[in-house]
Image (tube, grey):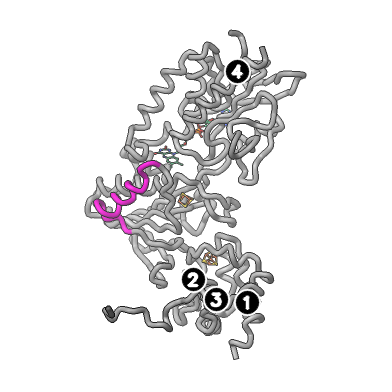
Amino acid sequence: MKENIVIVGGGIAGLEAAAQLLELGYKPIIIEKSDRLGGHVADWNCLFPDMSPAKDVVSSLIARSAEANIFLNTEISFVNKLKDSYNIMLSNGISIITRIILMTTGFSLFDASKKEEYGYGIYDQVMTNRDLEDWFNTGDDKRINDSAMNAVGFVHCVGSRDEKARNSQCSKVCCITAIKQAIELKQKFPDAMIYCFYMDLRMFGKKYEDFYINAQRDYGIRFIRGRVSEVGENIDGRVIVKAEDTLSGKPVKVTLDLLVLMAGMVCNPDSTKVANMARLPIDSDGFLKSKDNVADIIESPKEGVFYAGACTGPKTVPETLAEARAAALKIYLYIKGLE
Amino acid sequence: MDFGFKLSPSSAINLDKVDLEKFEELHRAEPDVYKCMACGSCTSTCPANKYSGMSMRKVILALQRGKEKEAVSMMRNCMLCGKCTMVCPRGINTRHLILSICRIYEEDVK
Ligand SMILES: Cc1cc2nc3c(=O)[nH]c(=O)nc-3n(C[C@H](O)[C@H](O)[C@H](O)COP(=O)(O)OP(=O)(O)OC[C@H]3O[C@@H](n4cnc5c(N)ncnc54)[C@H](O)[C@@H]3O)c2cc1C
Ligand code: SF4
Ligand code: SF4
Ligand code: SF4
């Protein structure tokens, strides 16, 4: 089958869709901006809720999609709408005529240094959820000192649910990620006190609530309901965190050896760039706008353009994979309809 | 049977009896008042909180629970510095809200 299918983004959504389309007999083209496949999941260590190794998920996807035409380090330079197809020019000079585009451009992690009051990039002992995943993978981060990890804090909703950060929506995965990372740190440092500063805990997924109960009962993670308002540093470089403990109605202050900021999922500017070229609409949350947010999340309002994964909003790995499979089937039926 | 653990009637909030007329007036003037998610950022940064217990979060809650006196007496300690407005993640103009509360609940203040 000669039909060209262009998949923009080689994260797990793009790879899963490609693998399915290969099984259906097509040879999709994956355009990936970075120098490697797997997107964000390739940066994570273990995945909630079962602590499955992220690298297993990514390597099996890469193996299953290996037969696709994959362009790494490649971006889209422009998209022209022809009569019943699109002409896509790539940054490597290749141009492709296609009737089908699948957007799997994913999300961006909120840049935590924009919330200066949390001191990321200013105080030594402040890191993000991504930095912590990195440490789980490499064991190398000067902020984590094996002999002095007595107290650690997690700040929920960093750059999410925050109109000052121009992002009012909830990133959905960071509550459960905080709990996962808190448990993992507690396993590494059993004597450390670990606090989560939250406003609401959103344990929406399968087994997430159990994970939360584990964190409370088996690991003694302390949950404090209040948004961190201020972070400072003392003379020995430890961080001082202030918040209102809204349940007791009293101000709280705690000195920590490490502060982890749960940076949220925001729309990816590279996604918006391609959307503008292809004249795809943007939703009020900044992510790509689907034809319908209930019935047609994987369809764009444009003929032949489909979506899968976090490019339409915060999503977990299983949700992303399910959408990618659904998009592959949709594309298959769409091509059948054209014949 | 009486175990002697009954809520004392004065501390219980009876939502059937709470009169929200003024709060509705406040809401018309300050539609954002309903956006509060009780995160406590305002309270935590409030310079008046430390010595007086002033808490914007508590004021917004108390007004909706019919505890107007409590709210208004807390507000007497506000210096209108506006720090709470700077930190509110829901973008509520709390300083402006305080002025509207003062206007609408004026007679309670006396
Ligand atoms: C800290 C953190 C931890 C998480 N942990 C878990 C977990 O344990 N379990 C779980 O279920 N979920 C987890 N998630 C969610 C998970 O990361 C997402 O579900 C997943 O990354 C979505 O995959 P995606 O392919 O849609 O997007 P992405 O992973 O963002 O991949 C998008 C890909 O597209 C590429 N791209 C973007 N724009 C362009 C362009 N214009 N041209 C070419 N290429 C482009 C990018 O380089 C990237 O490779 C976590 C999220 C965060 C933030
Ligand atoms: S998932 Fe939790 S931490 Fe993340 S934005 Fe939503 S409420 Fe905040
Ligand atoms: S304006 Fe009033 S309530 Fe707000 S921070 Fe200042 S003193 Fe506190
Ligand atoms: S900072 Fe804003 S949202 Fe948070 S408790 Fe105060 S008024 Fe409510």
**What is the CA distance from the residue labelled 3 to the residue labelled 1?**
11 Å
Q: Looking at this view, is A281 or A182 the one in front?
A: A281
Mark nearest the camera among 4 and 2 is 4
Residue behind mark 3: B63
Which disc number belongs to residue B21?
1
Mark nearest the camera among 3 and 4 is 3
Residues rendered magenta in the picture: A206-222
Q: Residue at x 66, y 74 (%)?
A: B25
Label 3 in the same subunit as label 1: yes
**What is the CA distance from the residue labelled 2 to the residue labelled 1?**
26 Å
Q: Which amino acid type corresponds to the residue marked 4 in the rendered image?
A: Ile
Label 4 in the same subunit as label 1: no
Badge 4 element? strand
Residue behind mark 4: A5
Ligand 4 within 8 A of label 2's CB? yes
Badge 1 element? helix
Q: Which amino acid type corresponds to the residue marked 2 in the rendered image?
A: Thr
Residue B82 makes an appearance in the image: yes
Badge 2 element? helix
Which disc number belongs to residue B43?
2
